[in-house]
Each structure stands twice: as structure tokens, then as C-alpha cells.
Amino acid sequence: MPDTEEKILNVALKVFISEGYADATTRRIAQEANITEMTLLQKFQSKENLFRETIKKIQMHF
């Protein structure tokens, strides 16, 4: 089972792809990951940081 950060990154990727960066919200990502928005922000501090980490994760697979 993935840890919380991995779970958030996986969900964030899906939300960013389906809704685009501008329309994706940390609230929506947290809901989809079944965590609180506070937990998400404690791990990543902001949507921008979360997006950067999501991109890094994608780059690691290439």
C-alpha cells in the first residue's frame, strides 16, 4: 500500500490531468485521496509544490 505522500501524488496526477492545473484544487485532491486538506498542505505546503513533485514523479519514470 502506498504511503500518504505517494497516494497524494497519484491522485494529484489524475486531478491535474482531468481538470488542468488552474482548475485543480488542493481541496479536490485531498477529497479524492481520502485525506484532509490540512494533511495535504502539511506534506506539500502548496498546490504549486504539489504540482512540482507530481512532475518529478513523472520524470522519474522516463
Image (spheres, rainbow, N blue to C red):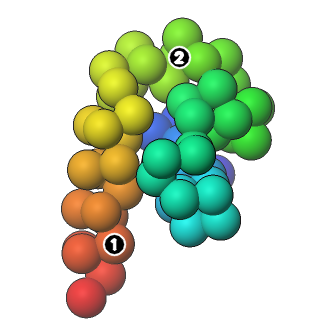
Task: Count neighbours of disc 2 (C-alpha within 10 A) and say few if under 14, some if 14 to 19, many if 20 or more.
Answer: some
* Image position, residue 46 (x, y; %): 35, 26
Q: From this viewpoint, is residue 2 visible?
A: no
Specify the farthest residue to the front.
Answer: 22
Q: Which SS class for mark 2?
A: helix
Q: Which SS class for mark 1?
A: helix
Q: From this viewpoint, is residue 8 visible?
A: yes
- Residue 4, compared with residue 57, is above or below; it is above
Residue at the (24%, 62%) spot, across then down: 56
Residue at the (74%, 31%) spot, across then down: 31
Mark 2–mark 1 Cα distance, whole angstroms, equals 22 Å
**Tag of residue 58:** 1
Please name the residue that numbered disc 2 is placed on.
39
Looking at the rendering, which quadrant does residue 24 occupy?
Answer: top right
Looking at the rendering, which quadrant does residue 19 occupy?
Answer: bottom right
Q: Quadrant of the C terminus?
A: bottom left
Q: Earlier in the sequence, mark 2 or mark 1?
A: 2
Are the residues flagged by discs 2 and 1 in contact, CB closer than 8 Å? Answer: no
Residue at the (30%, 63%) spot, across then down: 55
* Image position, residue 34 (x, y; %): 75, 32
